[in-house]
Image: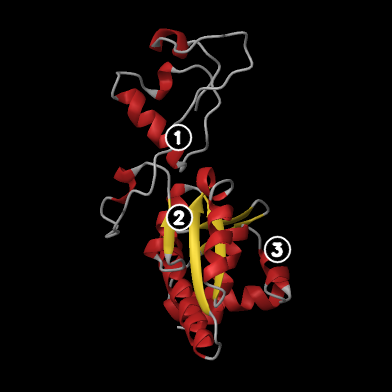
Amino acid sequence: MNLQYLKAFFVTVKLNSISKAAKVLHLTQPGLSMQLQSLEKELQASLLNRSNKGVELTEAGKIVFDYANTILSLQENIERDLTNLTTDKKQLLIGSCKAVGEYALPCSIYIYKQDNKDVNINLEITNTNDVLENLVDRTINIGIIHGCLNCIDGKNLVTEKVTSNPLVLVTSLPLMKNSISLTELKHLPLIFREDGSGTRQCILDTLEGHGVILDDLRGCK
């Protein structure tokens, strides 16, 4: 299989646009279309449905896209590790959820670097689900997530608790209380993190233990 064609297909799907993908890949649109057609011919399957709204994966395309993600990640890992052999510095790739990566982790990385100057550290901040997927694909060495330990089921990953991070309900309303009831909570206009967030899932799991589901809450989806 031609990995260049596979990458062209992968980027096109990710950007949902042949014109945008062609620009990123430094190709002409006809050139990119030819690569996509060559991949389909090689695999003997139609992978994409094209329209003025972008591209849509066929059933065969969905299968190829999932494998492409893994194959291209492995290719990048091989190239990275071979490059590391020719340099004196080690590479440490860290993935972190936003709750930790945007606030606490940069300071810890700075302190670590003081005693480990021969290590190049790359930090990628995404949500918990993406961190776990990157660990499975081996595009990062270490992942730091918030709660959501049930998210690792079936992923063959090892976890270790580092610290606790209490969550506090914050409001601009004139509500001066040390605690509120579940009934009061249900009537507050809450703002939640996005799907895939460990913080979001941790809150939902805790509320579910008290008989409260997402649909019970005001303004949450």
Q: Which residue is mark 3?
A: 20
- At mark 2, the secondary structure is helix
- Marks 1 & 3, CB-CB < 8 Å contact: no
Amino acid on which disc 1 is placed: Arg
Instruction: Sort mark 2 into few (<14), some (14-19) or many (20+) by Cα contacts within 10 Å.
Output: many
In percent of width and height, residue 84 lies at 51, 84
In this view, the residue in front, 138 or 141, is 141
Amino acid on which disc 2 is placed: Val
Q: Which residue is mark 1?
A: 200
Q: CA distance from mark 1 to mark 3?
A: 33 Å
Determine the residue positioned at 45% across, 8% down: 184
Determine the residue positioned at 52% across, 42% down: 99
- At mark 1, the secondary structure is helix
* Residue that sits furthest to the front in the current view: 115
Q: Which residue is mark 2?
A: 131
- At mark 3, the secondary structure is helix
In percent of width and height, residue 39 lies at 51, 77
- Where's the N terminus, which quadrant? bottom left
In this view, the residue in front, 213 or 18, is 213
